[in-house]
Every structure is written in C-alpha cells, then in structure tokens.
Amino acid sequence: MIRLFLFLVAPVFFSCNNSVKKKTGTDNVIDSFTSTLKENKVEGELYISLPETYSVRHKGGADFMVYYLGPADSTVVPSFSGGIYLGNFPSEFPATSDSCKTSSVKGQLLGMERDWKVFTCDSSFFLQTIIDNKGDKSADKLHAFGKGVIGNEEKMLKVFSTLKRK
C-alpha cells in the first residue's frame, strides 16, 4: 500500500525533470533565507523550523504518516518543498531520468550528521535520507526528502537540520 502511494505521489510531487518555476507571486525562501524561521510541530515530540510563510501538512495511511513542508498558501509555486515520512517501510525515491547526476552530501538531522543522497537534474535537485527513528515507538524509520533550485542544497539541509525532538 505504501509503495503504491509513493509510486503515485513521488513522480508528481518530486520529479527532478520538473524544474522549479519562478514567477510573480512565488515565494523567495531560498533566495532570502535570512527570513525568520518559525518552529512548527511535525508530530508528537518532533519539531522543525520553517520560514514564516511555510506550514506542515500531513497525509497518512494505515501504518505511516507523511508531513509535507511547503508554502502555507497552496497557490504559491514553491522554490523549496519537502517532506518527512514516518513509518516502518520507507522507499528511496529514484532519479526520474538517466541524465540525473547522483552524489552524496553530509547534513544534520535530529542532531546527528547523516549521509544525504542528491539527484541533480536540469535546473533542480532532489535530496533524501532514511534513518532509524529512535525514540518513536510508532514508526521505525524516518525518511526526509526535499526539492529545490540547484545551488541551494545547503539552505535546504539547514531547514532539515532544525528537526528535533522536544
């Protein structure tokens, strides 16, 4: 069930072939990252700091929850979007094209340095990591993922570095 969900949602929401569009009215979170970050509750004891114009939305299944990070105004084309999967059976998103380049970077998540897989495709990138979700009895794994404009990977990793347990 979860694989079907990820199979249907991932290509639409996180396709590397769809470059991030900039138009009048779009958010400029990546470009003006000095904006104030506001702490948002993800689930239970998990919190993440996001730009003030962003929010956390969730969708769940019988045995998992996915928390989407994006603009509170759903009509805005985001320059950054991402998500956090909590469940027992995560799956890595594959690159959507053979032309995507794959690399890895280090970044903080839940206070520890993690390896993040990065796909660079055309003018956008997609990054992700899957970790053991220690301290949460309802979900064994945490899969963090996001997409943005090439050159802003570090800024996106900064957002994920704010994920913490209280």
Image: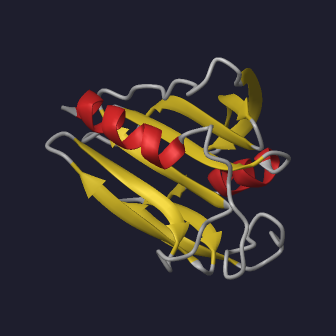
Compared to residue 12, the image places residue 134 above or below, namely above
Compared to residue 58, the image places residue 110 above or below, namely above
Residue 147 image offset from top left, x and y in percent: 63, 47
Residue 44 image offset from top left, x and y in percent: 34, 60
Is 25 displayed left or right of 131 in the figure?
A: right
Compared to residue 2, the image places residue 18 above or below, namely below
Residue drawn where x is 77% and y is 29% of the image? 105
Question: How many circles with numbers are drawn on the protein?
Answer: 0
Residue drawn where x is 40% and y is 56% of the image? 67
Taking depth in this image into account, of 141 and 75 the one nearest to the observer is 75
Residue drawn where x is 83% and y is 73% of the image? 32
Taking depth in this image into account, of 11 and 160 the one nearest to the observer is 11
Question: Is residue 109 visible to us here?
Answer: yes
Q: Quadrant of the N terminus?
A: top left
Question: Is residue 133 visible to us here?
Answer: no
Is 141 displayed left or right of 139 in the figure?
A: right
- Quarter of the image holding residue 88? top left
Q: Residue furthest top?
A: 98
Residue 159 image offset from top left, x and y in percent: 67, 57
Taking depth in this image into account, of 136 and 29 the one nearest to the observer is 29
